[in-house]
């Protein structure tokens, strides 16, 4: 594959992201590149060959593969980002973007929060005879009890993340770099103590010290597989993943009327818009209660007739 053709430029951008430590974006770029190569039959493709017709055909091809709306949108957005960068770095004359006519409409994310009653049921499980499955549960519970900390951040926690004599947990999110601090609750401490080992760098026995990104992805897949088995064991209507517990913390905090700004900060979001995606909608009775509280005084002043 020539470095000058578009596939080669896509590969270079993927490698650049990986060298900067942005493994998630690099993986996404690789997926987009593989799909684009498959779509076009792998024939050499220059920037000038990426036309509006080709982009439209690729979009249709992705949709016909049965991918969900947001996955298609993600692939198209990242293809556009790679194309725009390749065009900026080239000496080709710039005309109208082949993506100009593409309008992507985001599909509302299906809420993945686990009800608190189910989390209580999971916390009461005794799986000491299956230590790997017990660890999977404990990691999910730690996520919920630690303000929805993502799995990737849990498995990278070390003793250095515990400050003020172990009473405060602080860390930078792997995904965004956002700095987060929280009190270590009794439940969090119980799980930390359960896996305490001075010979190990990380608080929880998941990753080896020099783990690669591929090893991390394997650990994440294993965690989600165990969570799926547990949801089947409990005869739940839906299976859940590590992110279900992050959503659950946000939704429960919202149900308890914690301000969205506080929830957003605890989750490490850069905007409240992102936080709102996590939140389950209040049921009608909650909204009715709120409306009565707000409007009752005015309603009592209305003139009859």
Image: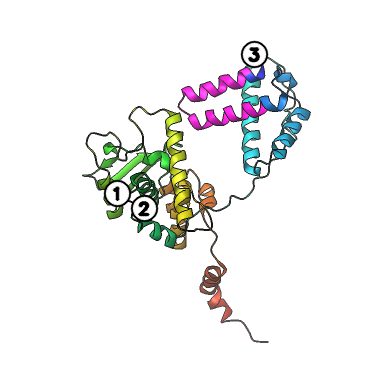
Does the CB distance between marks 2 and 1 fall below 8 Å? yes
- Which residue occupies 48% across, 50% down? 244
Residue at numbered disc 2: 145
SS under mark 2: helix
Q: How far apart are the two marked residues, 3 and 2, measured between alpha carbons?
A: 50 Å
Q: Nearer the viewer, mark 2 or mark 1?
A: 1
The residue tagged 1 is: 191
Q: CA distance from mark 2 to mark 1?
A: 10 Å
Q: Nearer the viewer, mark 1 or mark 3?
A: 1
- The residue that disc 3 covers is 4
Q: Determine crowd level at label 1: few under 14, some 14-19, many 20+ residues with C-alpha closer than 10 A.
A: some
Which one is in front, 266 or 154?
Answer: 154
Say above or below: 170 vs 114.
above
Q: Which element is circle 3 on? A: loop
User: What residue lies at 72% left-to-right and 39% top-to-bottom?
Assistant: 64
Q: Main secondary structure of the magenta part?
A: helix
The residue positioned farthest toward the bottom in the image shown: 305
The boundaries of the magenta stretch are: 8-36
The answer to whether residue 100 shows anywhere in this view is yes
Q: Residue 86, how many percent across, how many down?
A: 63, 21
């Amino acid at each position: 594959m020539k470095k000058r053709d578009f596939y080669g430029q896509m590969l270079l951008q993927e490698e650049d992201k990986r060298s900067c430590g942005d493994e998630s974006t690099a993986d996404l770029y690789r997926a987009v590149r593989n799909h684009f190569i498959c779509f076009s039959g792998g024939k050499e493709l220059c920037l000038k060959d990426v036309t509006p017709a080709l982009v439209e055909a690729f979009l249709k091809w992705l949709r016909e593969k049965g991918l969900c709306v947001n996955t298609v949108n993600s692939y198209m957005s990242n293809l556009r980002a790679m194309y725009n960068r390749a065009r900026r770095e080239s000496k080709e004359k710039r005309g109208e973007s082949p993506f100009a006519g593409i309008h992507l409409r985001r599909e509302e994310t299906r809420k993945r929060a686990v009800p608190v009653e189910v989390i209580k049921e999971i916390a009461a499980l005794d799986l000491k005879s299956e230590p790997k499955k017990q660890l999977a549960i404990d990691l999910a519970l730690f996520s919920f009890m630690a303000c929805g900390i993502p799995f990737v951040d849990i498995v990278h926690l070390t003793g250095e993340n515990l400050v003020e004599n172990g009473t405060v947990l602080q860390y930078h999110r792997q995904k965004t770099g956002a700095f987060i601090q929280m009190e270590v609750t009794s439940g969090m401490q119980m799980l930390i103590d359960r896996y305490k080992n001075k010979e190990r760098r990380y608080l929880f026995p998941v990753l080896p010290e020099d783990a690669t990104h591929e090893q991390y992805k394997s650990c994440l897949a294993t965690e989600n597989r165990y969570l799926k088995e547990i949801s089947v064991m409990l005869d739940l209507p839906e299976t859940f993943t590590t992110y279900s517990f992050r959503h659950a913390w946000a939704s429960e905090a919202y149900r308890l009327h914690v301000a969205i700004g506080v929830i957003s900060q605890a989750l490490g979001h850069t905007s409240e818009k992102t936080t709102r995606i996590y939140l389950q909608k209040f049921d009608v009775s909650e909204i009715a209660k709120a409306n009565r509280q707000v409007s009752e005084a005015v309603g009592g002043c209305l003139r009859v007739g």
